[in-house]
Image: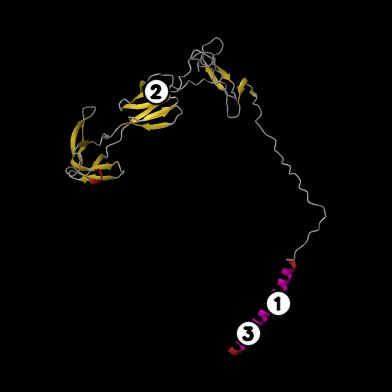
Amino acid sequence: MSLQAKDKLFLTVGGLALVLTSAWAFLEQSKISARSASVIAPSSGVAYEPKELKVVMPSSQSWGKASAQPAGDNWIYNVFTPPKIYYNTHSKQFTVIPPELVAPPVPVDPLVPPPPPRPALELVGVTQPLFRLQLVGYIGTEGNYRGTFNNELTGKTFFGTSGRKVPELNLEIVTFEAKRRKVEVAGGSTIIEVTAFAEVKDTVTGKLYRLDPEKRLPEGPLSATVKLADGAEKTVKTGDTVKSAEFTYVIGELTLDPPAVVVTKTGGSEADSVVETLKIPLPVAPAPEIPAGLEGMPPGFDGPPAPGFPGTR
């Protein structure tokens, strides 16, 4: 068969396929159009009346009451709560206190006075800001040491040695030294350690400051943190006025070691002003825990003993 005859055959088959495809698409589209027609559901003619939806609440489930074990009536194991078991080494017997689901109220001892009322103003602490440049360490080798300095205003760290200026802090590093020295330790032996220090000068006032990496250098007025009667904390300085409860306090002298604040108090039932010194209160010792079942027992009681023998836990 020649090439021209093949081309005619292919064109004839392609045309026939196109005609058949178009006919099939036309028939399917007619079916789809027939199905898309709106369908009207039959109606009874009665108006719609909404009905209340009944919500079925499941019945609550709870753990059943634990029953006693064969060892005795007090050997009861509640959910996650075993009984308290004591052993008497003299009688070689166990004493058991059954668990309680509800914690018993803590008894109030009439001989123990109630805690004092919270003061209207309480000292939390006294602090002092750091000098704006701190020596925090050193790098290098012997004869070529450089100091590691921290800019307290920006938090950035840089390396420096004698003669370096720090214009943003109005400071100049006048001297930096790091020396090796022998140090005696326990046992009579000696070790070699490097000690460093720096001397800086305020380029405005001319004042000299000695920096030590082992101890931060403070500078500036002291500030105190006080707690008011409502529990709020406030930072104050000398000369500030604080109102707490029915009193007014004027902050006076502040001491860093030991932390203390002198205040002048006015108000309340006091006719004249009163000068007081606030100190950090000592921590309150926690109340002793009373084991369940031992409420009302004398102090030091360690558990119910077996009859006729002193009890040991």
Sequence-first disc among 3 and 1? 3
Q: Which residue occupies 59% across, 89% down?
A: 4
Q: Is residue 1 shown to the viewer in this render?
A: no
Q: Magenta region: which residues?
A: 5-33
Dot 2 falls on a residue whose secondary structure is strand
Q: Please provide percent x and percent y for residue 71.
A: 62, 20
Query: In front of the other: label 2 or label 3?
Result: 2
Q: Please provide percent x and percent y for residue 171.
A: 22, 42
Q: Is residue 27 shown to the viewer in this render?
A: yes
Q: What is the spatial separation of the Cα atoms under label 3 and label 1, in whole angstroms? A: 18 Å
Q: Which residue occupies 33% across, 26% down?
A: 252
Q: As displayed, is residue 53 above or below residue 295?
A: below
Residue pointed to by mark 3? 11
Dot 3 falls on a residue whose secondary structure is helix
Q: Which residue occupies 36% across, 23% down?
A: 264
User: Of all residues shown, which one is farthest toward the top?
Assistant: 308
Residue pointed to by mark 1? 23
Q: What is the spatial separation of the Cα atoms under label 1 and label 2, in whole angstroms? A: 105 Å
The quadrant holding residue 201 is top left
